[in-house]
Image (tube, rainbow, N blue to C red):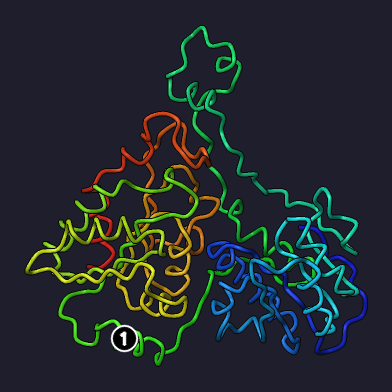
């Protein structure tokens, strides 16, 4: 571990800006670093610069005093103007993009700290070298996938020049939460990992129960989240979700809450139609909840069956166990919760081409097709029993 970088004198209650990440799951994975910063600077006024759609994620967070949000249409000058008015002493830039470093530079924040990356180091006053255990999530080429799975013919010169075998096992320190903790440690914070953490109030939960008709329920409440923003390669097949949901409902008399965004409405309607019967209880909430309502309902669930997506991270950070089929992505790098948390069931097929980090499978989708319904059903049942 490198020693903390030398920051210029700060008052006992500095004004610190955290340039937050742009995606829901990534934002949840930054919460341990914010908690560690709060430990280091208990009197600091810590603000987070965040996309407008994630603003409410930070309500009631112990590591954050305030939010500065921006909409998709706001340019870098408009965002910088908002920050300039707050007169921050220091900015910690969590994303790796050039823009995220330009914003605090234009705002005139005197100390600007972030990872050293091409096209942006000029805009930072101090750069942080990559971690020793950092792993780059590299997309496999189609040729590599064909070689690893044995599809490539012997005469394929491109594939045959590539390394064979599945991705080697990764240490728990490879996880993305350590990337953000490493940046916080550059300011002198404790680098030891914490579980990602979000909070909702009892009042929020009761309000959500009343709004969505969940005040009187007989069986356990379970969540099902069949979508994934990144692409089809992250989605366990809908017919498998349907089969698993039917079996679990029959064996537990559960109440299913179907989650997703507006773009997931079609698949959730398919699932709702397939599993509904006179004895079942199901609420299709895709596209119908605010972020805070989603959080409250996920907290209410005994477990969430989900793909690798933002709500997976939210549920785990709220203390709800998750069951997740993993295919194109790696639970060792971006899995939910703290690595090794036995409350969660992160299911992999062992396909030699997994993880490939592609949006679409170029072959036969064996990574997800090989994760059977009964395996998922047993994982959910073991979680709630």
Q: Position of residue 245 (x, y in %)?
A: 21, 58
In this view, the residue in front, 31 or 234, is 234
Rendered image quadrant of residue 173: bottom right
Reply above or below: 99 against 385. Answer: above
Q: Which quarter of the rendered picture does the N terminus lie within?
A: bottom right
Q: Which residue is mark 1?
A: 211
Q: SS at mark 1?
A: helix
Residue furthest to the bottom in view is 203
Rendered image quadrant of residue 193: bottom right
In this view, the residue in front, 301 or 143, is 143
Residue furthest to the front in view is 73
Q: Residue at point 31% right, 55% down?
A: 267
**In this rendering, position of residue 166 left or right of residue 373:** right
Q: Residue at point 60% right, 44% down?
A: 137
Residue furthest to the left in view is 278
Reply above or below: 186 against 356. Answer: below
**In this rendering, position of residue 67 left or right of residue 344:** right
Reply above or below: 74 against 207. Answer: above
**In this rendering, position of residue 199 left or right of residue 211:** right
Q: Which quarter of the rendered picture does the C terminus lie within?
A: bottom left
Q: Residue at point 42% right, 69% down?
A: 315
Q: Position of residue 319 (x, y in %)?
A: 42, 73
Q: Position of residue 49 (x, y in %)?
A: 70, 74
Q: Residues within 10 Å of mark 1 (few under 14, many from 20)?
A: few
Number of marks in the rendered image: 1
């Amino acid at each position: 571990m490198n020693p903390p970088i030398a920051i210029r004198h700060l008052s006992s209650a500095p004004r610190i800006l955290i340039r937050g990440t742009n995606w829901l799951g990534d934002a949840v994975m930054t919460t341990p670093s914010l908690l560690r910063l709060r430990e280091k600077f208990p009197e600091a006024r810590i603000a987070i610069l965040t996309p407008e759609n994630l603003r409410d994620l930070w309500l009631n967070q112990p590591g954050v005093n305030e939010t500065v949000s921006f909409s998709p249409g706001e340019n870098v000058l408009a965002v910088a103007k908002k920050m300039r008015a707050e007169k921050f002493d220091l900015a910690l830039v969590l994303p790796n993009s050039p823009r995220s470093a330009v914003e605090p530079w234009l705002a005139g924040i005197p100390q600007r700290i972030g990872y050293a990356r091409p096209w942006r180091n000029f805009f930072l006053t101090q750069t942080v070298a990559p971690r020793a255990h950092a792993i780059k999530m590299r997309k496999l080429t189609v040729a590599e996938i064909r070689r690893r799975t044995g599809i490539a013919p012997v005469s394929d010169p491109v594939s045959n020049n590539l390394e064979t075998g599945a991705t080697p096992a990764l240490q728990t320190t490879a996880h993305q939460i350590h990337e953000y903790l490493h940046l916080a440690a550059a300011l002198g914070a404790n680098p030891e990992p914490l579980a990602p953490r979000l909070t909702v109030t009892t009042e929020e939960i009761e309000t959500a129960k009343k709004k969505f008709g969940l005040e009187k329920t007989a069986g356990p409440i379970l969540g099902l989240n069949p979508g994934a923003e990144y692409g089809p390669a992250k989605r366990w097949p809908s017919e498998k979700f349907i089969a698993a949901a039917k079996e679990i409902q029959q064996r537990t008399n559960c109440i299913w809450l179907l989650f997703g965004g507006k773009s997931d409405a079609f698949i959730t309607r398919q699932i709702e139609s397939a599993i509904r019967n006179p004895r079942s209880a199901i609420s299709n909430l895709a596209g119908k909840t605010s972020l805070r309502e989603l959080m409250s309902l996920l907290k209410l669930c005994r477990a969430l069956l989900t793909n690798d997506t933002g709500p997976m991270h939210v549920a785990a950070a709220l203390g709800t166990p998750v069951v997740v089929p993993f295919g194109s992505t790696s639970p060792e790098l971006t899995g939910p919760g703290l690595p090794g948390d036995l409350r969660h069931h992160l299911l992999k097929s062992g396909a030699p081409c997994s993880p490939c980090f592609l949006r679409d499978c170029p072959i036969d989708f064996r990574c997800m097709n090989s994760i059977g319904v009964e395996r998922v059903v047993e994982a959910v049942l073991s979680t709630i029993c």
